[in-house]
Image (cartoon, rainbow, N blue to C red):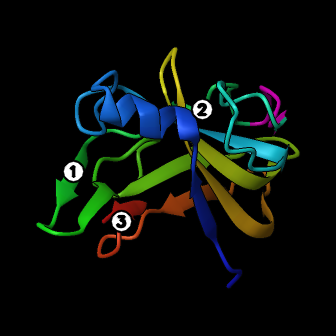
Amino acid sequence: NMAVVTSIYSAYKNDMLTAANSWTAATVNCALFSASTFTAADAAYTTSGTEVASANGYTTGGGAVGTRTVTGTTTKVCKITGAFGGGAAGTTTWTATGAGFSAVAAKLYVSASSPIAHIDFGGTQTASGGGTFVITWDATNGVFSLT
């Protein structure tokens, strides 16, 4: 297992404080990147990186992650409980075809708006043709938490 690091974009922090976007109500997508860095000031999810090309089972823009929840009182834990790609609840899944594809990071973003979070996988993850690329969101600690 590689160390996964999640970082939150400044634009989304602003959106949360000004009620421009809601973790539970907005459409939140997950996109995969073959090269990516986290730059807190990015205003678009595509700014600092190269998204996986539309081919071999991946479509540029990724897909909507489904239901999101917020739990906790003092610390707010933001979770993804829905599914994308036909996998189990709390997963985002792509089925690779042909040569498959690789990614080093995922980015969550509000459709047609702010980037939310950059999830660095800590190394290259690959799905070969016929295999699946699955992100299993942490059911206990969530994607991120706010204190």
Q: Residues within 10 Å of mark 2 (few under 14, many from 20)?
A: many
Q: Quadrant of the N terminus?
A: bottom right
Q: Inspect the magenta stretch and tell me whether residue 54 lies in it.
A: yes
**What's the amino acid at mark 1?**
Thr
Question: Does 108 sit above or below residue 7?
Answer: above
Q: Inspect the magenta stretch and tell me whether residue 14 lies in it.
A: no
Q: Which residue is mark 3?
A: 142
Is 102 on the left or on the right of 64, as rendered? Answer: right
Q: Residues within 10 Å of mark 3 (few under 14, many from 20)?
A: some
Instruction: Tell me which segment is drawn in magenta.
Output: 50-56
Q: Position of residue 25 (x, y in %)?
A: 23, 29
Q: Earlier in the sequence, mark 1 or mark 2?
A: 2
Q: Which residue lies at the image location 63% right of the left edge and 68% below the top edge?
A: 5
Q: Which residue is mark 1?
A: 69
Q: CA distance from mark 1 to mark 3?
A: 9 Å
Q: Which residue lies at the image location 41% right of the left edge and 40% below the top edge?
A: 65
Q: CA distance from mark 1 to mark 2?
A: 20 Å
Tag 1 near tag 2, CB within 8 Å: no
* Helix, strand or loop: magenta stretch: loop
Secondary element under disc 2, as helix, strand or loop, is loop
Q: Position of residue 84 (x, y in %)?
A: 42, 41
Q: Which residue lies at the image location 43% right of the left edge and 63% below the top edge?
A: 137
Which residue occupies the foreground of this view, 131 or 110? 110
**What's the amino acid at mark 2?**
Gly
Q: CA distance from mark 3 to mark 2?
A: 20 Å
Answer with the quarter of the image where residue 3 lies: bottom right
Q: Which residue is mark 2?
A: 62
Is 28 on the left or on the right of 26, as rendered? Answer: right
Q: Earlier in the sequence, mark 1 or mark 3?
A: 1
Secondary element under disc 3, as helix, strand or loop, is loop
Q: Position of residue 55 (x, y in %)?
A: 80, 29
